């Protein structure tokens, strides 16, 4: 549980990075230097915290220590960060009730698609 929580902390790294890439306005794409420094600190501390062997190098730890469930958690973190970035661009143009309804409908559609895919593939085995 602690490992998953630490990996989910990557949302704090992914959100500014995705905003810099996919932001729809100059203010969204402009990320202050202190935010990038905080992202780097978060990345290093997360990698150090989730590695099993403290003697292994950082890059090797990040690459070799991620299990398939870890990859699922990273994918969830990426999806959440992208949702935050996209909602930030829609909030100026759409009323809150419409945004909430659209978000729930999209999440439901993607969840059903994932369930269908998992059913086809035989589920997730850890």
Image (cartoon, rainbow, N blue to C red):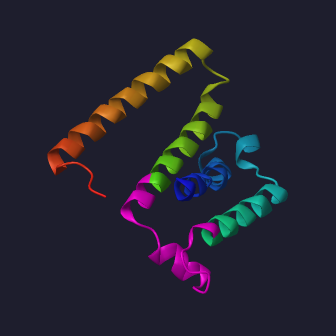
Q: Is residue 77 left or right of residue 89?
A: left
Vertical placement of residue 106 versus 1, above or below: above
Q: Quadrant of the C terminus?
A: bottom left
Q: Residue furthest front?
A: 1
Magenta-drawn segment? 49-72
Vertical placement of residue 1 versus 24, above or below: below
Q: Position of residue 66 (x, y in %)?
A: 45, 68
Q: Is residue 63 magenta-colored?
A: yes
Q: Position of residue 81 (x, y in %)?
A: 58, 45
Whether residue 75 can be seen here? yes
Vertical placement of residue 69 versus 66, above or below: above
> Front-most of 121 and 51?
51
> Front-most of 88 and 100?
100
What residue is at 69 percent from the left and 39 percent from the top?
A: 25
Whether residue 95 can be seen here? no
Q: Is residue 51 magenta-colored?
A: yes
Q: Position of residue 87 (x, y in %)?
A: 59, 31
Q: Position of residue 124 (x, y in %)?
A: 27, 51
Q: Is residue 27 left or right of residue 121?
A: right
Occupied quadrant, residue 64: bottom left
What residue is at 18 percent from the left and 42 percent from the top?
A: 119
> Front-most of 39 and 56?
56
Instruction: Give the total number of marks visible in the rendering.
Output: 0
What residue is at 61 percent from the left and 53 percent from the top?
A: 14
């Amino acid at each position: 549980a602690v490992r998953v929580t630490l990996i989910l902390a990557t949302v704090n790294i992914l959100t500014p990075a995705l905003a810099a890439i996919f932001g729809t306005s100059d203010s969204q794409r402009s990320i202050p230097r202190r935010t990038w420094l905080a992202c780097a600190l978060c990345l290093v501390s997360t990698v150090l915290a989730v590695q099993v062997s403290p003697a292994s190098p950082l890059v090797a730890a990040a690459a070799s220590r991620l299990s398939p469930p870890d990859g699922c958690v990273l994918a969830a973190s990426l999806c959440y960060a992208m949702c935050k970035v996209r909602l930030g661009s829609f909030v100026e143009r759409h009323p809150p009730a419409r945004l909430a309804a659209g978000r729930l409908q999209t999440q439901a559609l993607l969840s059903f698609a994932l369930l269908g895919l998992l059913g086809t593939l035989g589920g997730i085995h850890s």
